[in-house]
Amino acid sequence: MLKTARPDKKKEFKKLIKKIRHDPENGLRLFYEKYARIITIAAQIICKSEHRTSEVVSEVLVKIWKFAQKPSEIDAPESWIYVVTVNTAKDIMRRHFADYAHSAMGGDCALSLDSNIDENIISEGDEIQAVIDEHSFYWTIKDLSETEQTVMVYKFVLLYTFQEIADE
């Protein structure tokens, strides 16, 4: 279960979603400026390539735009964005794996997707230093399990306390 965000974070998120609905270009730009780090790092963890990461970022922004058209209550915006990004990245990796396998087999195969991707999908729902270098952060945590990576992102990107992470 996702925890409830501080009221100021929820309020700011709602304001950005409203801005996206009424002024998509500026709203999405502001949204990206606010949440680029978490979206990019979460995408890098799954995709491990710049090209796929940028594809995930684009698709996440499209999903955010669609969400803004009929928003629902989000109790923990940063957690929700993280989950949307991880699931989007896994969908894209699954899609590219299927396309690759299909073309490698000449288009005549019954494809069974890698179960490792499916089994890890998450269900939807004080700065350390000035800035974390996203590339080195990714390389630091890339060999950790998905759970350990998630804890690291919550602690060092979202700046949650360990108690807040435990409450997730």
Image (cartoon, rainbow, N blue to C red):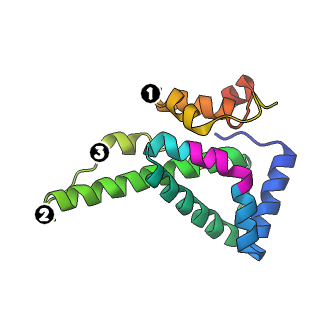
Task: Identify which amino acid the numbered label 1 is placed on.
Answer: Asp
Quadrant position of residue 151: top right
Residue 37 magenta-highlighted: yes
Q: Quadrant of residue 131?
A: top right
Which quadrant holds the C terminus?
top right
Q: Which mark is residue 143?
A: 1
Image coords of residue 160 (percent x, y): 73, 31
Residue at 82% across, 48% down = 9
Is the C-beta separation of discs 2 and 1 under 8 Å? no
Whether residue 71 sits left or right of residue 140 in the image: it is right
Give me the residue at 58% from left, 47% from top.
40
| Contact between labelled residues 3 and 2, with CB atoms less than 8 Å apart | no
Residue at coordinates 64% horizontally, 50% vertically from top-left?
81
Dot placed on the residue nearer the N-terminal end, 2 or 3: 2
Q: Is residue 53 magenta?
A: no
- Nearer to us in this view, 55 or 82: 55
How far across and down, in percent of the image, does residue 109 sit?
Answer: 14, 59
Mark 2 = which residue?
A: 106
Disc 1 packing (10 Å; few <14; some 14–19; many ≥20): few
Q: Magenta residues?
A: 33-41
Q: Judge from the rendering whether residue 168 lies leftward or rightward of residue 59; answer left or right.
A: right
Relative horizontal placement of residue 115, taking residue 65 as reference (left or right): left
Q: Which element type, helix, strand or loop, lies under badge 3?
A: loop
Q: Whole-Å distance between the Cαs marked 2 and 3?
A: 19 Å
